[in-house]
Image: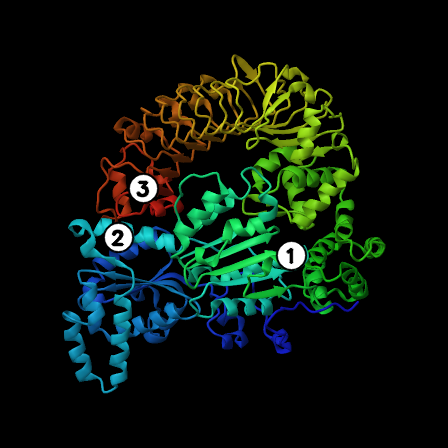
Amino acid sequence: MQKEKRQQSKDEENDSSSRKRRKADLSKPVSFVSTAAMTEPESSRSGPEGAYDVFLSFRGEDTRKTFTDHLYTALVQAGIHTFRDDDELPRGEEIPDHLLRAIQESKMSIVVFSKGYASSRWCLKELVEILKCKNGKTGQIALPIFYDIDPSDVRKQTGSFAEAFVKHEERFEEKYLVKEWRKALEEAGNLSGWNLNDMANGHEAKFIKEIIKDVLNKLDPKYLYVPEHLVGMDWLAHNIFDFLSTATDDVRIVGVHGMPGIGKTTIAQVVFNQLCHGFEGSCFLSDINERSKQVNGLVPFQKQLLHDILKQDVANFDCVDRGKVLIKERLRRKRVLVVADDMAHPDQLNALMGDRSWFGPRSRLIITTRYSSLLREADQTYQIKELEPDEALQLFSWHAFKDTKPAEDYIELSKKAVDYCGGLPLALEVIGALLYGKEKHRWESEIDNLSRIPESNIQGKLLISFDALDGELRNAFLDIACFFIDVEKEYVAKLLGARCRYNPEVVLETLRERSLVKVFGDMVTMHDLLRDMGREVVCKASPKEPGKRTRIWNQKDAWNVLEQQKGTDVVEGLALDVRASEAKSLSTGSFAKMKRLNLLQINGAHLTGSFKLLSKELMWICWLQCPSKYFPSDFTLDNLVVLDMQYSNLKELWKGKKILNRLKIINLSHSQHLVKTPNLHSSSLEKLILKGCSSLVDVHQSIGNLTSLVFLNLEGCWSLKILPKSIGNVKSLETLNISGCSQLEKLPEHMGDMKSLTKLLADGIENEQFLSSIGQLKSVRRLSLRGYSSAPPSSLISAGVLNWKHWLPTSFEWRSVKGLKLSNGSLSDRATNCWDIAIIGQ
C-alpha cells in the first residue's frame, strides 16, 4: 500500500534531495553549524563524546596560579567539565587546532579579562573564535569576567589594553587582524558578565561562588529524552530547526500537526534539544490536553512556564487570568524557546501564549496539535504524515529484529505487518515489539489478526499487543493506564507487586519491551493512544454503567457512582479528586458494595459514616488534603501497601498500636498539623516520608520496630528537637534526611551501630552539639551539611576540600566518605544541590 510522504505544508515544498541526506542521530542533542554541515559526517554535527561544558580563556601569566586556578577548581568540583589548555592538551600536538576545537565543542566559554589579556595574541584569537561560536547557529554562551580591570578598558581598549595594541600595531603587518581583535574586545566588553570590582571588598571566594551559581544556571540540563532509532524525521527536524534558527528579531511561531501516534511530540523534542541552549530560557510543556483536565487546569502549566524560564518560584496564584498577566509581565523582555505539546482547545493556547507580545524579541514558539485550525497564527506549519514503506519497514525492523532490516526469511511477513500498520510510527513500534523473538507461526497468526482490523482503526491495531498479554500483565497495564501515568516507578512497582503474582520489576520491563509503557528516569508513562486504548477496554465491559467497570478514573463517572451509590463488587479501583470542587462530602455507604476495591484515591473528599463499610482489601489509599484530624479508627488496613496522605489536616494518624505487615510506603508530607508519628509495628515498611510536617515534635519510639525501613525523610520538621533512642535499632535504614530540622539537638548515641546508614542529609542545622554527634556514624558515605555557617573556612577552594576533615569531629570516619555537600567555601548553593564532591583519595 503506497503511503504519502511525510510532508511540510504552507510555504515550502519537499526537496527530494533532502531524503538522501545522511541521517542524524536525533536521540542526542545536535549542533547544526550551517546548512552545509548537514552533508558532513554525523560526528561533525553532533557533540563528540569529549565535548566540554566550559572553555576557560585566560592570560596565564596573570591568573593561571591564582584566580583562574581557584575558578577552575570550583568548576570541576561542581561537576562542570571544564577545558583549560595546560591540563587538557596532549603534549607534542599543535596547540591552535586543539584550542579551536575545544572552543567549538564547548557549551559555554568563560573569558577572564585581566590587565595582560590583550597582550597575548593567542588570547585574542581565542576570543574571536568564541564570539564566532556565540553568534553562530550553535548559540554558544559567552561569559566575560573582568578581573581587576574595568570593562570600559576592554570595550574601548584603554589602559593596559591600549599599551598592548600599540605593540600589536607595530608588530603585525596584517592590520585586519588588529582590527578584528579590537572589534571582538568591543563586543565582549558590552556583554553581561561578572566584575570583581562590583563585589564588596573584592572577596574572590564570594565572587567565585556567585560565578559558579550563574554558570550552573546557564548550563542547567534542558535536553529531553528522545527514543532511539528515529526514522524519517531528520530532514523535517532540520527544516524546522533551520526556520527557527534564522536570525530575525520577530517572535516566530511554528505549528506541527498530524494524527495521534504520528510523531509530533518526538519531532518537537528533537528540535527543542537542538535549540534550547541558544536562549535566555526554555520550557517544554508536555501533554497539555490531558493534564489540563486535572486539578487547577492550566494554572500548573503557567507556573511551569514561569519557573522553567525564570529559574525561580513565582508568586503563588490559582487563576488562569492572573497567570496570563504574570507571563506577559515577566517574559516580554526575554528571548525564550517554548514548546506547547498537544494543544487541543483555543483556551489552552490563549492561557499559555496568548499573544506574541508576551515574549521578547527573537523568541521561538512551537505548537503541536491534532487540529490544524489552532495554527492560524503560526508563521510556518508542518503536517506530519505516515512513513513511506521503506521507512516504515526500517522502523518496524528496529523493534522486531533489533536491526535496520528484517531477517531474510521474514521479509514478506514483515512487509505484510508494515502494510497493516499503515505507516504509523507508534503502531510499527508496538507491533514490532510484539513480534520480536516469536516463531514464524506466531507471526502468521498475529498478522492474520491485523488483517481483520479496518485500516482506520488505530486502537484496534494496538489492541493486538494488549491481547497477547496474559491476565496478570493485562491488569498491570490497565492499572497504569487508568491510575499511574507519570508516577514514580518505585511507587507503581509497590502497588503492582501487591496486585499481581509476578515480580513488579519484571512486569514493568515486559510492558516496556512490548512498547506499551515507557520508563523515563524514575517515571512511568504511556502514549496517550495506548492510554485511551486501555481505558476503552475497561469501558467496553460496561459502556453505560460505570459502576460495573473494574476501574473508574473519569471524575464525573466517579462522583456519580459514589453520590448515587451505584458501585458494585466488580470495581477494583476508583480515583476521585474534588480538591477544586465545591461539592466534597460523600457517605462511606457509597463504597459498601465495592467489596473487591483495591485502589482508592479520594483527594479532598470529606467522608462521613462508618469506615467499616469500605473494602477490607484496600492496598492503595491516596487521600491528599484529607480534612480529618485523625485517621478513622474503624478503617481496616490489613492489606494496605501505600498510604499517601500529603497536605492532610491530620494531627495524629491513629491512636494506639497498629501492626501492618504489608505496608510499604507512608507519605504524610506537608501535613502541617501533625504532631506525632504513629505507633506502628511493621516488618514491611520501607519508606516513611514526613517532609514539611512543621508541627511534628514526637517521633514515636515504635520506629525502632520498623525492621525494613530504608528511607526516612524528616526534612523541614523544624519543631522536632529529639529523635528517639530506638531509631538506632533500625539496622536497615540507608537514608536519613533531617535537613531543616533546625532545633534538633543531636543524634541519639546508638546510631553509630547503624551499618546500613550511608546517606545523611542534614542541611541547615546550626548546632555544635549536633555536629559533634555526627562523629559516631561509621558508615556514612554521602554527607550534606549545607547552610552550616558557624565555622567553615572561607578559603575552601584554595586550601582544598580535605581541610573539612579538620572542621568535623576527629571521630568521624572520613575513610568511608565518598561525597560531601556544603554551601560555603566558595561553592555555590546550586552546585551543592546537584553534585557530590569527591573527597576521598586515600
**Does 508 sit above or below residue 189?**
above
Can you give x and y, in whole percent of width and height, for residue 46 in the image? 49, 67
Between the residue at mark 3 and the residue at mark 1, the CA separation in whole angstroms equals 50 Å
Looking at the picture, tell me which residue is in the foreground, 266 or 65: 266
- Determine if residue 227 is in view: no
Q: Are marks 2 and 1 in contact (CB under 8 Å)?
A: no
Asked whether the residues under the numbered discs 2 and 3 touch, taking CB atoms below 8 Å apart as contact, a structural biologist would say no
| Front position among marks 3 and 1 | 1
Q: Between disc 2 and disc 3, whose residue precedes?
A: 2
Label 1 residue SS: loop
Mark 3 or 1 closer to N-term? Answer: 1
Q: Amino acid at mark 1?
A: Tyr
Q: Which mark is residue 208?
A: 2
Residue density around tag 2, few if under 14, some if 14–19, many if 20 or more, within 10 Å? many
What SS does tag 2 mark? helix
Examine the rendered structure and indicate whether residue 80 appears above or below residue 579.
below
Q: Quadrant of residue 297?
A: top right
Apparent side of residue 484 relative to residue 592 in the rendered image (left or right): left
Inter-mark Cα distance, 2 to 1: 50 Å
Circle 1: is it few (<14), some (14-19), or many (20+) Cα within 10 Å? some
Q: Residue at x 69, y 36 (%)?
A: 502
> What is the number of the mark on residue 624?
none
Number of the front mark, 2 or 3: 2
Query: If you read the primary sequence from the N terminus, does the residue marked by circle 2 or circle 1 appear first?
Result: 2
Provide the residue designation for mark 1: 371
Which quadrant holds residue 757? top left
The amino acid marked with disc number 2 is Ile
The N terminus lies in which quarter of the figure? Answer: bottom right
Residue 117's x, y, as percent? 21, 69
Mark 3, residue position: 822
